[in-house]
Image (cartoon, rainbow, N blue to C red):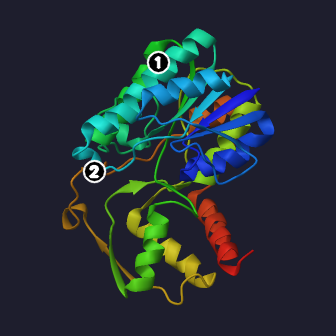
Amino acid sequence: MKILLLGAHGQVGFELARSLAPLGELHAGTRDGKHLSNPVRCIVADLANPETLGNALHAVAPDIVVNAAAYTAVDRAEDEENLADRINHHALTVLGAWAKRTQALIVHYSTDYVFDGCGTRPYREDDATAPLGVYGRSKLAGENALRESGCDHLVFRTAWVYAARGRNFLRTMLRLGAERDQLRVVNDQCGAPTSARLIADATAQALARDVRTNGTYHLCASGECTWYEFARAIFLRAAAAGIIQREPQVVPVTTADYPTKAQRPAYSVLDTAKFRDAFGLHLPHWEHGLDAVIGELATMRAGG
């Protein structure tokens, strides 16, 4: 089985390069055609440039395309709508059309930002979507492009993604916590922090089961918390692991106290029952994922 992994340089892509390798012949697609892991075959595939994407698909002729590439700069997207739409939407039109012709499977990652956050219970896959900004609209348009193409596809919506590498909330908190004695963090937005490793491992295990069930599934950690609660948990564990010398004071604030260009959903917890039932997989509590990532950071810090 040939697998083409798009976005292999990203935090989810990095973990997927590890988890997908045992499943078959893995090829990585990146904007520069290079990958940090030398054994992985690599090719140029830039979702902002449809020509390179088409060339990569033709050259590799994969059975499965796993698309971990995306435009994810939520605030900047408000000023770069065309670029966000080209990467998150139009590239999916190219992928879907190619997969329909070749009978390949597309695995694609979407986001909790397709919802408006006005709900009071975890969102199910068939709940009404109502994205609040450019990023969410572009991701929803990409989902719809795959569905309309008629290709075999799995859309995995996830949320609050973080990892030991890349740009994410956890790494930002650790950087700011080392610089400041006090941090103000939003306490009225609720979600489920989900590690890139969990997403990658669950994806590989789902594919290994060869359950060709087209559709949309919610894939994220169980449990829920606010950004403030997540930050407190990060600093507690990081201090215990010796990653930071002391815990900064974390002050809870409201979204109104911390204005951003793009509006965020206030409640974006996702119901994962459909994923768990379809693939027979357990999705652990978000605190377990955080423990693992902090452990990984401690090992990296120690040079192990």
Q: Residue at x 29, y 43 (%)?
A: 118
Disc 1 target residue: 147
Q: Position of residue 125 (x, y in %)?
A: 46, 31
Q: Is residue 246 above or below residue 124?
A: below
Q: Position of residue 302 (x, y in %)?
A: 70, 80
Secondary structure beneath dot 2 equals helix
Instruction: Say which mark, if any, is on residue 76.
Output: 2
> Is label 1 or label 2 in front?
2
**Residue 131 visible to an observer of this rendering:** no
Judge by depth and name the residue closer to the eye, 83 or 283: 83
Quarter of the image for residue 165 reads bottom right
Q: Is residue 178 above or below residue 65?
A: below
Question: Tag 2: residue type?
Answer: Arg
Question: Tag 1: residue type?
Answer: Arg
Q: Residue at x 52, y 72 (%)?
A: 234
Q: Residues within 10 Å of mark 2 (few under 14, many from 20)?
A: some
Q: Residues within 10 Å of mark 1 (few under 14, many from 20)?
A: many
Which image quarter holds the N terminus?
top right
